[in-house]
Amino acid sequence: MSQSTALRSCLRAAEQGAPAWLPDSAAPEEAHAFQAAFLPDPSAVADMRNSTAAFLGRSGLRGSLADSVVLVVSELVTNAIEHGHGEVELEVRVASGTISVSVTDENPAPAVLTEAGPKDLCGRGIALVEAFSDKWGSSGKETWCEFRCDSAGSAA
């Protein structure tokens, strides 16, 4: 299946509200990745958390590093659902000692690090991304972060 055919299939599934997986056949042999495209429904947060944990487990990553990646995926997906527009896309990639996470939506405004007060119920998502990842950024429609790991799958 070509990547454009896979993308069309993924988008059709997303229109029906189901998470859809895109195989990453163009990645180098040492890279492992998955992509999901879904509608901005709050129930997708748990699905993406569980799918990320399963993907990391299949990639040999477990423990506190995997837990941190899953937490950050949850925060970025929640942020895209609450503040974005249209379809949301998630990509998690493991390659060359780095775990990369990217979440894209249709909102052109970049994610912003804010300081939540002690009584605020929300507003800590990007602060958690900054605290747990090694680096992060936002270019408007895409918010991304990276984690370094050693060959044993632990934080580097």
Image: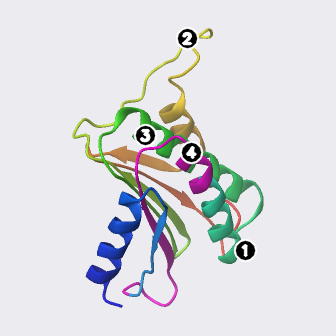
Q: Residue at x 34, y 67 (%)?
A: 12
Query: Mark 2 and mark 4 in contact (Cβ < 8 Å)?
Result: no
| Chain-order first, disc 4 or disc 2 | 4
Numbered label attached to residue 55: none
Label 1 CA crowd tier, 10 Å (few <14, some 14–19, many 20+): few
SS type, badge 3: helix
Per the image, the residue denoted by label 1 is: 152
Few, some or many residues within 10 Å of mark 4 (<14, 14–19, 20+): few
Distance between mark 1 and mark 2 Cα atoms:
38 Å
Q: Quadrant of residue 153?
A: bottom right
Q: Where is residue 152 in the image (x, y as percent from the top left)?
A: 72, 74
Q: What residue type is labelled 4?
A: Ser
Q: What residue type is labelled 3?
A: Ile
Comes first in the chain, label 3 or label 2 = 3
Mark 3 nearby-residue class (10 Å; few <14, some 14–19, many ≥20) = many
Q: Which residue position holds label 2?
A: 117
Residue 82 visible in image: yes
Residue at image mark 4: 43
